[in-house]
Amino acid sequence: MSSRTLTVAVPDNILARIRDRAKLANRSLEAEVVDLLTGAVAGDDAVPADVEAAIAGFDLLDEPALRRAAESRLSPKDHARLEHLNRKRRNEETTKAEERQRRELLRRYERAMLIRAAALAELHRRDLEIPNLNAP
């Protein structure tokens, strides 16, 4: 994907929030801004650019690699934290930091699910056995 440089004047309070999001996500400020812009202009059914890049070569992967991708998920620690933050959000008010963390964990969860779905679709397209992902 080609890219161009864009210079934009951003209010200090907005820039501070974007910096916080980038730090929370452990990403560069530039990566966070690109992600925000991508999300702002993408349709509701659009696949995020990072996911699209991750699944672009699935048709070239061998079966074991596809099976590993089909098992993509959040770590147990991240999954538990996301559940906790979702529960807290339903029952009481969350802090701004908690809400940012919840959104980032949700974004990572959705990314894992899209990768998982793409891997399963490719296994199905090849007429290969679909693994039971609910098994322990």
Image: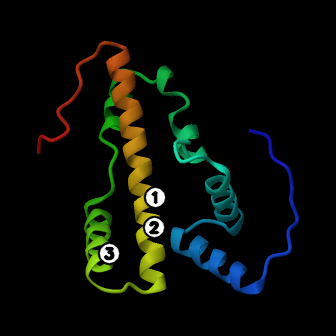
Q: Which residue is mark 1?
A: 107
Q: Counting other residues with Cα less than 10 Å from the Cα at mark 3, is it few (<14), some (14-19), or many (20 or more)?
A: many
Q: Which residue is mark 3?
A: 85
Q: Residue at x 80, y 76 (%)?
A: 10
Image quadrant in which you'd find residue 33: bottom right
Q: Quadrant of residue 61?
A: top left
Helix, strand or loop at mark 1: helix
Query: Picture coordinates of residue 119 (x, y %)?
Result: 38, 31
Q: Mark 2 or mark 3, which has the lower sequence index?
A: 3
Tag 2, which secondary structure? helix
**Left or right: 21 in relation to 104:** right
Q: Which mark is residue 103?
A: 2
**Label placed on residue 83:** none
Q: Amino acid at mark 1?
A: Arg
Residue at 50% over, 21% down: 60
Q: Amino acid at mark 2?
A: Arg
Q: Residue furthest top?
A: 127
**Cα distance in 3D space between marks 2 and 1:** 6 Å
